[in-house]
Image (cartoon, grey):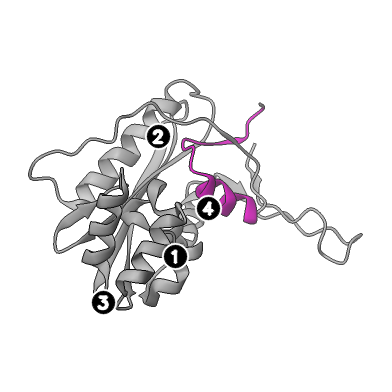
Amino acid sequence: MGKRLILASKSPRRSELLLQLGLDFDVIPSRIIEDFLQAESPKEHVIRLAEAKVLDVGNRYPDRWVIAADTIVYIDDMILGKPNNREEAMEMLKRLSGHEHWVLTGFAVHHVGEGKGAHGAVQTAVKFKMLTPVEMEWYIQTGEPFDKAGGYAIQGIGSFMIESISGSYTNVVGLPLCELIQMLNQLGTITFPPLSSNSGGRGEFGMRIVP
């Protein structure tokens, strides 16, 4: 597997975001259970889990840079997880309908062998339109809500429910790319190679891991 980055997540959405940037990485999900602690703030929660995930995988691959993240949706200080059934999905959509909520992602980057790492958190405000009962029932029947925090996917069919967004779009998808790339750059993890001149600048465009 060489010295490629490791994404400590099985989320296809996070993989797709990194692939868009041309990054070369392996997917090795963490074994961390996403639990909740009493009196823990939403920000403390996502950072704690992102750090736990990145170290779980980093300790197994100490010579590799590892990225991990944890995303939650919350409204009125209530965290909305992934709905387990139709009833839970409907309850979440009713709660979000016509209101603004927050999407918060904690993310961490570590290289255990070099003793380098950093973490951060990004928050985005998302406003739902007022949903009709028919719209909510139809959306649940698509099956999309059931593996998504908050019961919807902004990059999928659920986009029809989004009235406005303030902040990072990729954060709502699952990984705040602007802040993540800034962190990787500051840690000296990646480099930006010159584009290939053989294909009009469209050849080898991906960011590269610093050897």
- Crowding near the residue tagged with mark 4, few <14, some 14–19, many ≥20 C-alpha atoms within 10 Å: some
Mark 1: amino acid: Gly
Q: Dot 4: what SS?
A: helix
* Foreground: disc 1 or disc 4: 1
Q: For residue 84, what is the image quadrant?
A: top left
**Which residue is disc 3 drawn over?**
98
**Which residue is disc 4 drawn over?**
185
Q: Dot 2: what SS?
A: helix
The answer for how far apart the CA atoms under marks 2 and 1 are is 29 Å
Mark 3: amino acid: Gly
On the question of residue 79 being in view, the answer is yes
Which residue is nearer to you in this view: 60 or 173?
173
Mark 2 near mark 1, Cβ–Cβ under 8 Å? no
In the rendered picture of this protein, how many numbered marks are placed on residues?
A: 4
* Foreground: disc 2 or disc 3: 3
**Which residue is disc 1 drawn over?**
158
Magenta range: 2-20
Give the residue at x 66% y 26%. 1
Image coordinates of residue 200 in percent, x first then y, are 87, 67
* Foreground: disc 2 or disc 1: 1
